Image: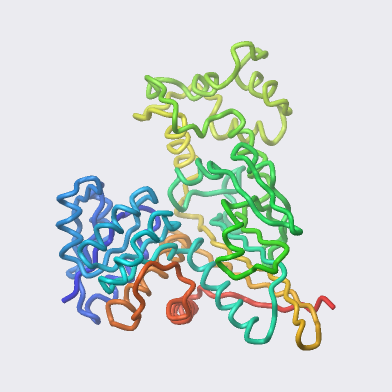
Amino acid sequence: MKNVLVLGAGKSSPYLIHYLLENAEKYNWFVTVGDLDIKAARSMTNGHPRGSAIKFDVNDQEMRTSQISKSDIVLNMLAPMFQHQIALACVRHGKHMISVSYEDERIRDIQKDAIRKGILILTEMGLDPGIDHMAAAAMIEDIRKKGGIVTSFESYGGGLPALDSLINPLKYVISWNPRNVVMAGKTGAQYYRDKKIKIIPHHYVFLHSWPMEIDGLGMMEAYPNRDSLNYKSLYGFEKADTVIRGTLRYPGWSETWFQIVRLGLPNEEQRIPGLKNKTWAELTEMFLPHNAVGPDVSQRVANFLNISPTGQIMQNLKWLGLFSDEKIGVKVTTSAQAMTYLIGKKLELTDDARDMVVIMHRMNVKYPKSDKREEEYVATMIYNGERGGFTAMAKSVGLPAGIVAKLLLTDKLPLTGCHIPMHPAIYQPVLKELAEYGLEFTEKVVQKK
């Protein structure tokens, strides 16, 4: 019997664990789920005869060593900050690792060791990053076989409420780690448009949004996502004059979150004593200048931000509760932690609503060696979650990782070293099985000239 270790029982883990347990009898493996919150881990194994739940502290080296050393494969669903130390332990003990978060810049340092141990260290194996990579790689492979050259590449993705589940004024629900929503844009962004590099400082990311039409959804808005410049070399787009990766939201999100960033509330660095017993209005007041003008905190915020006190942005801030006299009431030490708690509560995905994930790739392609035609390729995936069941986010993040785990455990993926899912040995079988679960792209080609 082979042993599978899943680290992390958060919002993105349920379908991964479901998939592994569903296949455990057939393929003769046992699934251990580890999380600091043992109740969360138990809720996901749910007494399954091929599963168990353990309390797992990633910072406990003895525990980390013990659990990883007796596993055949580790699926890391923990926060990105833990990816490197889990990978190091996996290499040390010769165990495969799959992670859904962005590749830590230190991972490539263990490439030779991973190859020597005959193991695969696979990162970015979720939705975005993950499915986006695989779909792009498949499209690019097809285009190049036909003699095409990609001259422009745009990729957009997002986790959102479904069109029939717009249950709050911000038109957003929390289907993944709320901290990631609060800290989005923290590192700024950069992209390549019309042969020019565009640099966006972190406090201006949400100011640089633009409308984006998505087939099947209508008009959305997009803002730049992290560092798009790396994708010129990663995808082999040396001749492209535009390379952009963006995040999708319903219109209005960016202008509201931009003002929250302007206030400074997504702050993880400054510790604030006694926050539990402060009100939300008192927290907001802390981020205003001492000479801010206005009869109450909401008016002072409107004046400081120079926005309409009765406009939609202020209505959104009020609805979130930033001006309320309700006490924060939980143990937090920074405003970012407080905001994480707040949006987790206010933007909760209720049982009568469902979420949705979206990925759209758009490429302009030239065929210089044939008829010199130009085409626009558009591939779109829209997938809705279940009301009161598995979210689209959990399914689209967890299923790709689960499929690769199955390939490794059944000796159908002979790849070693450190990778993201750009290799055909990964993306071809994974995309095929994802389509069987309804996670597939609709493609169209438009002749440009």
- Quarter holding the N terminus? bottom left
Q: Residue at x 58, y 69 (%)?
A: 235
* Position in image of residue 184 (x %, y %): 53, 45
Vertical relation: 125 (above or below) 343: below
Q: In terms of depth relative to the viewer, which is nearer, 61 or 129? A: 61
Tell me: 294 left or right of 434.
right
| Residue farthest to the right, as pictured | 449
Q: In terms of depth relative to the viewer, which is nearer, 139 or 180? A: 139
Tell me: 32 left or right of 235.
left
The picture quadrant where one finds residue 16 is bottom left
Q: Residue at x 45, y 45 (%)?
A: 178
* Position in image of residue 264 (x %, y %): 55, 29
Q: Residue at x 52, y 22 (%)?
A: 281
The picture quadrant where one finds residue 442 is bottom right
Vertical relation: 169 (above or below) 381: above
- Quarter holding the C terminus? bottom right
Q: In terms of depth relative to the viewer, which is nearer, 183 or 390? A: 183
* Position in image of residue 367 (x %, y %): 75, 82
